[in-house]
Image (spheres, rainbow, N blue to C red):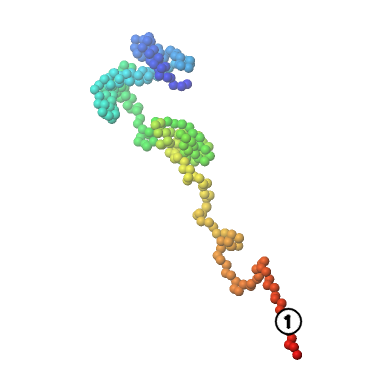
C-alpha cells in the first residue's frame, strides 16, 4: 500500500486534538484505534508510534516557524543561516522539555547512549543513503541505467543486480551490489574499445605470419627469383612470319 498523502496525515493529526483523553498520549492511543479513508476509498489505520512520529515532525516545523524564524537572523548567506539554525537546535530546542517525551530530547538521547552504535570510517558509508534500483545484466556484461549503457564491475551476465546512486546526480556515481555484497562502481560503456571481440588465449602479436613458401601466396610474396641466362628466344605469338623474296634469273651473255 502506498504511503499516506499529506492531506491524510493532516486529518490524522487533526483528530488528535479532538480525541478523548486528558493527556496527549491517551489521545494518540484513541486515534490509533480509528479508521480513516484515503483518497482512493481504501480504509487506513495507523499505529500510535506512526502518529507520534508525524506529530513530532509537525511540531518541530511549527516550533521552528514560531521561534527560530521570529529571531533577528543574519540572512547574508546560506552558510550563516545554517550556523544560526544549528546553534538554535542545539542550545534551545534540544534543551527544552518535550511534551510527548516528558523530558528534553538531549536527555532522552543520553538514556540510550550506550545502545547507540556508530559506523566505522568507510568510504562506502554514504552509499547507505543512496537510492537503490534493480537492473538486469545482459549477456555481454552490460546494463542500462538512465538511458546510458554501463559495464558491470564484475562478471555478472544474466543476473539481477542492485544499483545504488545519488538522487541529484544519478549517473555520476553508480555502485553495483549483488546479493547484499558490494561489487564496485560501474563505468560507462566504451563503444570504441569494445567494437571488436576479445583476443583468444595464446594469440600472438598482431604481425601477420608469412605463408609457406610452397603456397601460391608465398610465391607472390616471396623474394624475386633469378632469371636464367641467355633465355631462348621464341617468336611472339600472333606476330607475322616474314615471307622470302623471289628474284628473277640473270640473262645469259650473247655469243
The furthest residue to the bottom: 255
In the image, taking residue 62 as reference, residue 154 lies left or right, namely right
Q: What residue is shown at x 33% (from left), y 27% (from top)?
A: 114
Which image quarter holds the C terminus?
bottom right
Looking at the rendering, which quadrant does residue 108 occupy? top left
Q: Position of residue 222 (x, y in %)?
A: 56, 63
Q: What kind of element bears circle 1?
A: loop
Looking at the rendering, which quadrant does residue 53 occupy? top left
Q: What residue is shown at x 44% (from left), y 40% (from top)?
A: 187
Q: What residue is shown at x 32% (from left), y 26% (from top)?
A: 113
Looking at the rendering, which quadrant does residue 185 occupy? top left
Q: What residue is shown at x 52% (from left), y 52% (from top)?
A: 203
Foreground residue among 255 and 98: 255
In the image, taking residue 38 as reference, residue 213 lies left or right, namely right
Foreground residue among 241 and 16: 241
In the image, taking residue 232 as reference, residue 105 lies left or right, namely left
The furthest residue to the front: 255
| Rendered view: 221 above or below 193 | below
| Rendered view: 12 above or below 189 | above
| Rendered view: 214 above or below 247 | above
Q: Position of residue 166 (x, y in %)?
A: 40, 33
Can residue 101 be seen at all in this image of the molecule? no
Which residue is labeled 1 in the image? 249
Q: Position of residue 200 (x, y in %)?
A: 53, 49
Counting other residues with Cα less than 10 Å from the Cα at mark 1, is it few (<14), some (14-19), or many (20 or more)? few
Q: Position of residue 236 (x, y in %)?
A: 65, 68
The furthest residue to the right: 255
In this figure, what is the number of numbered marks?
1
Can residue 170 be seen at all in this image of the molecule? yes
Amino acid at each position: 500500500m502506498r504511503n499516506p498523502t499529506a492531506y491524510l496525515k493532516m486529518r490524522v493529526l487533526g483528530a488528535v486534538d479532538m480525541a478523548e483523553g486528558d493527556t496527549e498520549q491517551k489521545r494518540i492511543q484513541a486515534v490509533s484505534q480509528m479508521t480513516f479513508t484515503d483518497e482512493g476509498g481504501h480504509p487506513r489505520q495507523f499505529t500510535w508510534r506512526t502518529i507520534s512520529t508525524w506529530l513530532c515532525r509537525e511540531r518541530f516545523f511549527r516550533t521552528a516557524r514560531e521561534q527560530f524564524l521570529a529571531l533577528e537572523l543574519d540572512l547574508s548567506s546560506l552558510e550563516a543561516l545554517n550556523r544560526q539554525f544549528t546553534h538554535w537546535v542545539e542550545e534551545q530546542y534540544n534543551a527544552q522539555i518535550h511534551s510527548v517525551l516528558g523530558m528534553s530530547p538531549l536527555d532522552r538521547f543520553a538514556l540510550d547512549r550506550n545502545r547507540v552504535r556508530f559506523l566505522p570510517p568507510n568510504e562506502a558509508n554514504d552509499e547507505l543513503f543512496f537510492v537503490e534500483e534493480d537492473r538486469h545484466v545482459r549477456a555481454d556484461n552490460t546494463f542500462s541505467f538512465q538511458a546510458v549503457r554501463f559495464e558491470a564491475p564484475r562478471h555478472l551476465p544474466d543476473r539481477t543486480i542492485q544499483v545504488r546512486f545519488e538522487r541529484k546526480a544519478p549517473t555520476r556515481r553508480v555502485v553495483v551490489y549483488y546479493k547484499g555484497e558490494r561489487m564496485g562502481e560501474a563505468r560507462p560503456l566504451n563503444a570504441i574499445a569494445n567494437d571488436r571481440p576479445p583476443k583468444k588465449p595464446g594469440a600472438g602479436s598482431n604481425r601477420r605470419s608469412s605463408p609457406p613458401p610452397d603456397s601460391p601466396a608465398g610465391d607472390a610474396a616471396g623474394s624475386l627469383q633469378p632469371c636464367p641466362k641467355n633465355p631462348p628466344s621464341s617468336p611472339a605469338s600472333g606476330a607475322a612470319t616474314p615471307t622470302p623474296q623471289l628474284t628473277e634469273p640473270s640473262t645469259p651473255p650473247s655469243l
